[in-house]
Amino acid sequence: MTLVGWLQILVFCGIIILLVKPLGGYMTQVFNGDKTLLSPVLGPIERGLYRLAGTSESEEQHWTVYTAALLVFSIAGLFLLYAIQRLQGGLPFNPAQLPAVPPELAFNTAASFVANTNWQSYGGESTMSYFTQMVGLTVQNFVSAASGIAIAVALIRAFSRQSVQTLGNFWVDLVRTTLYVLLPICIVGTLVLVGLGVPQNLNAYTTVTALEGAQQIIAQGPVASQMMIKHLGTNGGGFFNANAAHPFESPSAIVNLIHMVSIFAIGAALTNVFGRMVGNQKQGWAIFAAMGVLFVAGVAVCYWAEAAGNPLVHALGVEGGNLEGKETRFGIALSSLFAVITTAASCGAVNAMHDSFMALGGMIALINMMLGEVVIGGVGAGLYGMLLFVVVSIFVAGLMVGRTPEYLGKKIEAKEVKMAMLALLILPLSMLGFTAVAVVLETGVASMANAGPHGFSEALYAYVSATANNGSAFAGLTANTPWYNITLGLAMLIGRFLMIIPVMAMAGALVAKKAAPASAGTFPTTGPLFVGLLIGVVLIMGGLEFFPALALGPIVEHLATVAGQTF
């Protein structure tokens, strides 16, 4: 580890902290329906979209109607994206004349982008046409991100409102998030990326003759527009197969920094939105602090593991950190930082190959996703995931002191705890269940590039990433097979939508409750004690659920490496 490396990490953290309050304030205005600087321009468009959808900003929905609207919208998007891929060969903007996407891969990709996962079992430049990238994938990058934010806002309203039956309007939240938050930032960001060298065109691929005389095809296209929403919406799907390690996606250190900041910006700011909407910004800062401690701890372990390097290589007389699979332009520190950022958020964009990380470095990426990606997390998903842990923490605190648990004046009763636990248990059921089946079936084992614990980690990482709606991969796994395309697609849908339903059921129960004023016996939820309790509950639940799987994979691989064995 180096001083420069730590300074780079501290600069990133400082930028995120500075963005939390202003971006959170702006988004609060948007979600409350207040006028913003963009209202004169976007207001007529917003109202026109409501008329087209047959709704209005004054129409509110019960949690069941809100959830049903989200599910219907997502199912429609799933079928539309599947159809675009299957009909790709006959659609316009296909200069490379790419054929239709095979059925299993089309299902996997449609599920992936609708679930805000963006797992890619394909190489973008060799599989998807410009039309599919723009009209199919990029559109889902926007609306899947907006849908996650909408769910988080609905849950915030459940805590901020009392004695009502409605949580807002899904269509209104979807439109406002897209129009006022995602689109403006992405338009400005795309122009900045183009100015910094990221391509944005509809040209045919360029064929050039290399110095040795061989011909090389250089892919290009509408890259910058997808890069901005890919990171801002924590989607992660790369225009190119090499993702953010490709020089067109990330041509410089400044662009790399923009990518990293974009991944965390909205997720971090939503904690401030929570604090503002419940009437106490300290509540938001407490949640942000818990996320921040977990993030910094993950970065420290990952950076240490990669900077320490491989002891088997050191035994050969070669000193230094683990550079295999790293983005050598940016070094070990920024490659490690990017890996932790992208797995802490449900993004999945990568500028280094996680399969080449040391066992403990790769384990940090796994743990970030296993915890439900609540360390900042995906846009919306990170906040409502952490609020599930808040409910469980408050319940635990109530049991310890013998009082009825309450949070923000609302009693946390059996229904809320049951729904929170149901949502949290869905993730390990999918992650560990699919992995267990894959590692005993020949069709699953055949795709692993490595034997032993590392091969197990490859399969485990795939299902953890899919269920957590992350999309990154231990790239050694050959996932473009019928088995993995179908099962990973199912894992993505389970991780996204089967978790949202109990979250919304909990929100429906909370919004109907009355809020009592704080008393002398109320457990304070803005101080270090609560932050520590919340972190402890997150880690203990994750440890109980996933430690056996981690012991079979990265932990035993690390111990074997120290003992002189490799896989």
Image (tube, helix red, strand yellow):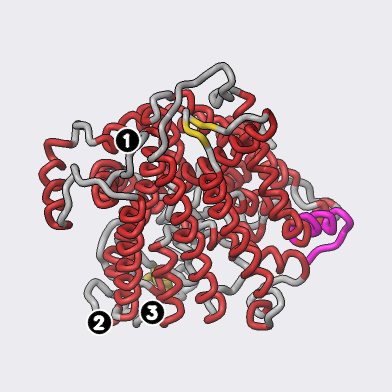
Image quarter of the N terminus: top right
Amino acid at circle 1: Met
Query: Is 306 placed left or right of 50 in the picture?
Result: right
Whole-number angstrom distance, CA of label 1 to CA of label 2: 41 Å
For image coordinates 67% across by 54% down, the residue present is: 362
Please state, as top left, top right, bottom left or bottom right, where the C terminus lies in the image. bottom right
Horizontal side, residue 276 vs residue 16: left or right: left
The quadrant holding residue 487 is: bottom right
Left or right position of 231 against 34:
right
Magenta span of residues? 553-567
Q: Marks 1 and 2: CB-CB under 8 Å?
A: no
Residue marked by disc 3: 101
Q: Please state which of residues 157 and 186 is positioned toward the viewer in this rendering.
A: 157
Q: Amino acid at mark 3?
A: Val
Task: In the rendered structure, find residue 90 and report the number of the disc placed on it.
Answer: 2
For marks 1 and 2, give the one nearer the viewer: 1
Check if mark 1's residue and mark 3's residue have beta carbons within 8 Å. no
Provide the secondary structure element on which disc 1 rests. Answer: helix
Q: How many marks?
A: 3
Residue lying at 35% horizontally and 81% vertically, measured from the top left: 100
Nearer-the-camera pick, 235 or 427: 427
Q: Secondary structure at mark 2?
A: helix
554 in the magenta segment: yes
Q: Mark 2: which amino acid?
A: Gly
Instruction: Estimate how packed mark 3 is, as few (under 14), some (14 to 19) or many (20 or more) residues with alpha carbons within 10 Å.
Output: many
Is residue 201 depicted above or below 6 in this figure?
Answer: below
Q: Position of residue 15 (x, y in %)?
A: 46, 30
Expressed as whole percent of the image width and height from the top left, the position of residue 6 reads 62, 32
Residue 27: numbered disc: 1
